[in-house]
Image: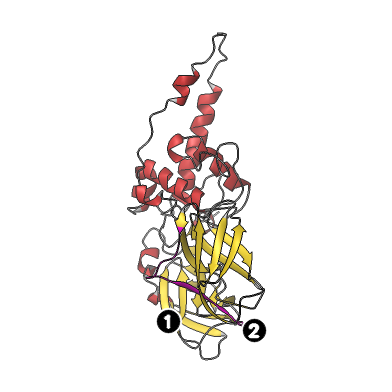
Amino acid sequence: MNARSIFFIILSLTLFYPASVVRAEMFARNLTIGSKGEDVKKLQVLLNGDARTQIASSGIGSPGNETEHFGSFTKIAVMKFQGLYRNEILVKSGITNPTGYVGVATRSTLEQILKNKTVIESKKTPSVSSAPKNESAVKSKTPITPLLPQFYSKKVTLYRAVTYQVAPKGKIVLLGSGFDSIENSINVGALYTISSVASADGATLEATLPDAVPFGTYELWVENRNGVSKDSARAITMIVTDTPAQQPYIESISPRGISVITGAVTITGSGFTPTGNNIYASLGNILNVPSGDGKTLRIAMKDFPFNSKASTPNTKGLSAMIWITIQNENGIQEKPFAVTIGL
């Protein structure tokens, strides 16, 4: 087996790991917001095993109530974990601040902790004492000062509406943070409110537009027990129309395996606008890309801000996978498109 097949590098917007990092066994893939699966639940169980990285004290995500969905609370807990193991994760990866992205270095550290925990538990011998446990001592742990307190606020925030244009009675999807698990109110302008909207992950709200909402452009904001998301300096809007535009969607990217330094790619899809197509990728962002036909976008790899960090003496000649998504006035492609590049 040659070096190309041994080392497969996964890049992210904020974490880039050297090819020498050993792949974790328990966590065999990178995890981020939106990831789903049994490995996400194992991640939550491990994080909940330490009071300093606990996802929640009660309800969804709390010890015994772990889920298979990677939401905003899981991301915050991962950031705490990365802060605790700064040398093993952040310093090794050449970055400063925790990101909440579970990449190779984070996975390797998680795997090592699991192995250490297994060894410790295997060495324990059953106690023959019948004396009751000192429960008060167990419960009186000293509160941990947050490593990154700015990330722990549950203030309700609305980031964007996934669908910018929607037909009457259509489905709307909102992304943000601080959403309540049961009781959220979505305000559509000053006159219309969708009440009692639940959020399974604290970061996503889905609802059906009320029948009475007429055509027009509306500001959106969310209210719950954590506050109100309305921000006059950063209004989130949505258009109600009987002819909603198609959201941008990537069908293909060619050629595959293009060089990160010298190559150029053509993105083929639909829902692209003449101007204002913003490309968000693991290598950085390229803004205001034009499309003459609404179906294609052409970009040079050298225009990505982080492309110079991708190709190093340690990675030269290898391949990597990056993710690309498109946002414009029609909306955003929610699920990124994966493409392989040469380093």
| Residue for badge 2 | 242
Counting from the top left corner in percent of width and height, residue 252 is at 59, 76
Q: Is residue 85 visible?
A: no
Above or below residue 227? Residue 192 is below
Task: Determine the residue positioned at 35% across, 68% down.
Answer: 308
Task: Determine the residue positioned at 43% across, 71% down.
Answer: 235
Tell me where the magenta segment starts and ends, as one range. Answer: 228-244
Q: Magenta segment: does it hold 214?
A: no
**How many residues crowd mark 1 within 10 Å: few (<14), some (14–19), many (20+)?**
some
Residue 316 is labelled as none
Counting from the top left corner in percent of width and height, residue 307 is at 39, 69
| Residue for badge 1 | 288
Q: Nearer the viewer, residue 126 or 209?
A: 209
- Identify the element where label 1 is drawn: strand
Quadrant in the picture for residue 174: bottom right
Above or below residue 323? Residue 296 is below
The amino acid at mark 2 is Asp
Counting from the top left corner in percent of width and height, residue 257 is at 52, 71
Q: Is residue 86 visible?
A: yes
Identify the image quadrant of the C terminus.
bottom left
